[in-house]
Image: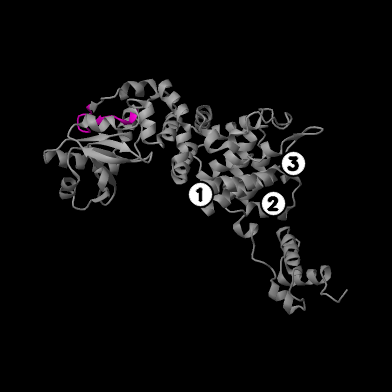
Amino acid sequence: MPQSQAESLARQVIARLRSAGHQAYLVGGCVRDLLRGAAPKDFDISTDARPDRILDLFPQSGLVGAHFGVVLVRDAFAQVEVATFRSDHEYEDGRRPVTVHFETDPKADVLRRDFSINGLMMDPETGEVLDYVGGRVDLDARLVRAIGDPDARFREDHLRLLRAVRFAARLGFAIEPATFDAICRHTALITRVSAERVRDELVRILTEGGAAGGLDLLDKSGLLSVLLPEVAAMHGVEQPPEFHPEGDVWTHTRLLLASLDRATPTLALGALLHDVGKPPVFRVVDRIRFDGHVEKGVEMARAILTRLRFSRDDTEQVESLVAHHMHFKDVGRMKESTLKRLMRLPRFEEHLELHRLDCLASSGNLETHELVKRKWEEMTAEEIKPAPLITGADLIAAGYRPGPRFAEILSAVEDAQLEHRLSTPAEALEWVLGQYPPEGEG
């Protein structure tokens, strides 16, 4: 595996620290990934050097966590975090320790960490691994296990409840039984974590790989009912078998997530929430009906994303995905102008991909998806959204009084333009005069 710029910098930093008489090792996720044969996303270093010493050795660096002894060392191409060995004490907010003690023993530093697979240290020159917590055994067994007492680890840092799920989902690992039981016992603690931190972990669970497995773990642990009861409510909500032979709304949604491949956050959320409006509107009259589920789903998606402090841009995109996901079924009988308006939606590629996933998770028929995809790829941006043939100013010049009627007229002109019935401003104005005479005429 070729060496990344971050790995090269990490090796240089460790060599410099050691030449100055300090212990220094790669630590955490980068070691886990190197042992798995995967490319680490970033590199962290643990050392007995105190923060002021690290700053002396690397003058271009800066403190990112003075209280916790974390220094960010940069060069022109990469950056690595260098942290002083420490032990943590007295977590009071369920997130960060009130006090830390700098240590000289690497074992003390490892024992404060979350999971055994993240508690490994490595000498990058020799490949020697320091393993004080059985991390290599758990890595081989594909297990996420809390270091020490799992109840204590989750009481210290409540976000670890979600981090356990994320690592298990992304790596395709199981959560060790005692660790999982502790998660189940402490699900209520997640409500004490800020919405922003919960949001970020949920997004990672949905987008880093293994989203369906992550959903299963959230559900089985009880975390889903605490954080997203609207999604947990999908269980057992039956669907018409002629349209959904796969089963209930939960099964359908899980199948969508199983097909996600490193999706954007908004697409992943659209997949999770596209049918969130079905449970509240479910009813059986002559058959199973979900009347108004799209409108209800948009309302619920907005409430969920607002609760989790998503940005306005992300919220609006997910709302749009939910609002339009049923429109694709009408493509076969859709006017060309309507189809072009659908294709001009912002980030239309996400709408198209959600439709593909929706089909795969139900009938498996991708004919409509392929039709729309082909048309979208063949059309230019100008064809999908051409410059208007006439404007409100043209209507005023032609003797029309400004008012609500303008929107109706201009929309009708655009329809005709998109359907190739009108192509010049003169044609458009003549058509308008015939179809929509100025008030008082005709």
- Reading the image, the residue beneath label 2 is 339
Q: From where the camera sits, is residue 208 visible?
A: no
Q: Quadrant of residue 380?
A: bottom right
Magenta-drawn stretch, dominant element (helix, strand or loop): loop
Position in image of residue 236 (x %, y %): 65, 28
Asked if residue 191 is among those painted magenta in the image, a careful observer would answer: no
Residue density around tag 2, few if under 14, some if 14–19, many if 20 or more, within 10 Å: many
Q: SS at mark 1?
A: loop
First reached walking from the N terminus: tag 2 or tag 3:
3
Left or right of 250, for residue 86: left
Q: Amino acid at mark 1?
A: Phe
Magenta stretch bounds? 117-128
- Reading the image, the residue beneath label 1 is 310
First reached walking from the N terminus: tag 1 or tag 3:
3
Position in image of residue 294 (x %, y %): 68, 44
Asked if residue 122 is among those painted magenta in the image, a careful observer would answer: yes
